[in-house]
Image (tube, helix red, strand yellow):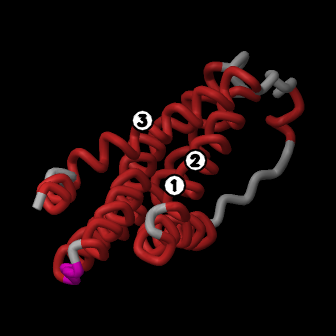
């Protein structure tokens, strides 16, 4: 009886906060242990930003966060979440001396990061569903649509808005 009460107290909101804390710890660890790299020659490099590549990559990460939850009892979701925090922390740490470059990540990151955290929360919630022997596919589908919609918006911003600010940032 006590165990089922404990499982039911993990709402999606609580799992989101846990996901956020895990992500932030990984991000901060990588940020502070990554040395800045020179960004001087970046302005002259040709950067091709492809909407479908960005969207599909983020969708793949989101699906991994969701599906690895029940398949690995949360361990896979945890690992993917930590790896993404480390990647972003390293990226930010390597350009921390150039705040204008850091600001380029903000427009799409404001949407993309919360969406990835939502996907992780869904993955962790599905672990709880496995233990309670009840998977709510309606819940998963509803939030999967939110994840996909958010990723479409983030990829659109990263593809079509961010490049307009790239030249001014360098």
Q: What residue do we see at 62% from left, 23% from top?
A: 100
Q: Are marks 1 and 2 in contact (CB under 8 Å)?
A: yes
Which residue is denoted by mark 3 in the rendering? 21
| Location of residue 125 by image quarter | bottom left
Query: Which is nearer the eye, 41 or 105?
Result: 105
Q: Spatial distance from mark 1 to mark 2, Cα to Cα?
A: 6 Å
Residue 133 shown left or right of residue 88 in the figure: left
Residue 32 shown left or right of residue 57 in the figure: right
Residue 108 shown left or right of residue 100 in the figure: left
**The N terminus: image quadrant:** bottom left
- The correct choice, above or below, for 169 with respect to 15 in the image is above
Residue 82's tag is: 2
**Magenta highlight range:** 133-137
| Location of residue 122 by image quarter | bottom left
The verdict on residue 124 being magenta is: no
Which residue is denoted by mark 1 in the rendering? 78
Residue 138: % across, % down = 17, 81
Q: Is mark 1 on a helix, strand or loop?
A: helix
Query: Which is nearer the eye, 148 or 169?
Result: 148
């Amino acid at each position: 009886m006590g165990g089922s009460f404990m499982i039911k107290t993990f709402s999606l909101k609580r799992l989101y906060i846990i996901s956020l804390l895990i992500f932030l710890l990984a991000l901060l660890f990588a940020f502070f242990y990554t040395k800045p790299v020179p960004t001087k020659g970046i302005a002259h490099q040709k950067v091709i930003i492809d909407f479908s590549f960005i969207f599909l990559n983020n969708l793949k990460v989101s699906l991994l966060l969701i599906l690895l939850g029940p398949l690995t009892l949360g361990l896979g979701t945890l690992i993917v979440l930590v790896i993404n925090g480390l990647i972003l922390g390293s990226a930010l740490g390597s350009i921390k001396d150039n705040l204008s470059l850091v600001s380029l990540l903000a427009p799409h990151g404001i949407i993309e990061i919360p969406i990835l955290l939502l996907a992780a929360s869904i993955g962790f919630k599905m672990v709880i569903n496995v233990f309670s022997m009840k998977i709510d596919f309606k819940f998963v589908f509803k939030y999967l649509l939110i994840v996909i919609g958010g990723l479409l918006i983030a990829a659109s911003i990263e593809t079509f808005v961010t490049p307009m600010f790239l030249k001014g940032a360098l």
